[in-house]
Image (cartoon, rainbow, N blue to C red):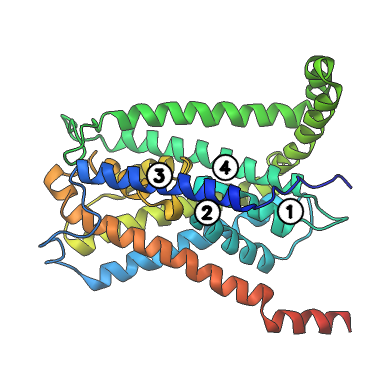
Amino acid sequence: MEPDPPNKSWSPARIARISGMSLVLLGAFVAIFRAGSLPLLPPPGALDRLNISWLLLAALSLELSILLKYARYHFLVAPLAQISFGKILNIGSIAGALILILPLRLGEFSRPALLREKGKVSGWNITGTVAAERLVDGVLFGFTLLAGLAIARPQEPLPDRIGNLAVPVALVPKAAQAATVLFGGALLVMALLLWKQKWVERFIHLTVGRLNARWGEVLAHMSARLVEGARFLPKPGLALPYLFLSWLHVATHGLALVWGARAVGFELSFIESMTVTGVLALGFALPNAPGFFGAIQLALYAGMGLYVDPNVVVREGAAVTFFFYVGFVGFVLLNALIAAAIEYGPWSRARAARAVG
């Protein structure tokens, strides 16, 4: 069995550096919102037409979207190891909270650490599935965004700023195209690794290995283990359910925005909300401050700016943004607490003891 990726020690100096970077990111986003007059809380009058029923529907749809994202991982890891669906859901929930809490997406390393089992599945293999998940998501959300822009044409002319922030909304379609090409290219590279792994290993040995034999061996080993994460792609029985659940994840995300907009008194069509969801995915892909603070709000403001009057964006749109952010953070943390209690609580130890007995 191959060794797992080495764990970096969490020394006080390293924690201090990460904390410092987090504070810099938080400060930068606060400055951006102040400069752009983009409210973090619903401004006066934004909740005058609040409809609790639509808001509850939006919350249920958002929670379903989060759970679907965790559940689909079952089909990614199935070629590598037999891990129960319940454990997949629990570990996904815990990892989701760590990704949310830790800055710069450091929480991505938690799932390999929590799912690896000596003699069964290595951390490198799980890391490969995480990489495959991110690449497939990038392509899926990118095409969702481009399709939404093609079907639901943005308003003309597009605003030349977001709030008072001198950032043209027209940059959104360009960013969507660039991100789709980037993630699509990376997915093709992973497909090449999957198809011609031996060729890739030989190429690494002939190039990097000639310069440094040790590094060539390490890189070849890493590529072989990481590509295991894409083993589900050529298997229709795994790839199709994964893609279907991924689409449901995106669709329920979009419905949460449709119903959230109705809750505060304005309309977003389903296709328009799917486009906003695609913009939000670009925000999630960036290195994040703790809680994805700033990235979520800015992405939602930019996405709604494609279709909604700028005055509505910074009033009712601010209310949608606030409810979405609070709901997302709340559900992710609540799911993680429940999952941790199930996976590591007293009754889990009692269940393990009965299994041994």
Nearer mark to the viewer, of 2 and 1:
2
State whether residue 172 is above or below residue 255: above
Figure check: 105 above or below 93: above
Q: Secondary structure at mark 4?
A: helix
- Residue neighbourhood size for the residue with mark 1, other residues' Cα within 10 Å, grouped as few (<14), some (14–19), many (≥20): some
Residue topped by disc 1: 78
What separation in Å lies between label 1 and label 4 (alpha carbons)?
17 Å
Q: Nearer the viewer, mark 2 or mark 4?
A: 2
* Residue marked by disc 2: 102
Residue at left offset 35%, top offset 26%: 174
What amino acid is at disc 4?
Answer: Arg
| Residue 165 drawn above or below residue 27 | above
Residue 246 locus on image (x, y percent): 53, 50
Residue on which disc 4 sits:
134
Q: Sequence order check: which comes first, mark 2 or mark 1?
A: 1
Is the residue under label 4 in contact with that under label 1 (CB below 8 Å)?
Answer: no
Task: Classify 10 Å Cα crowding around label 4: few (below 14), some (14-19), many (20 and above).
Answer: some
Which percent across, then down, holds residue 193?
73, 29
Mark 2 in CB contact with mark 4 (< 8 angstroms): no
- Disc 3 is placed on an element classified as helix
Q: Residue at x 67, y 50 (%)?
A: 76
Spatial CA distance of label 2 from label 4 is 18 Å
In the picture of the structure, the residue carrying the numbered disc 3 is 25
Identified at 21% across, 37% down, the residue is: 165
Query: Disc 1 or 3, which lies upstream in sequence?
Result: 3
What x and y, as percent, mark residue 265? Answer: 16, 60
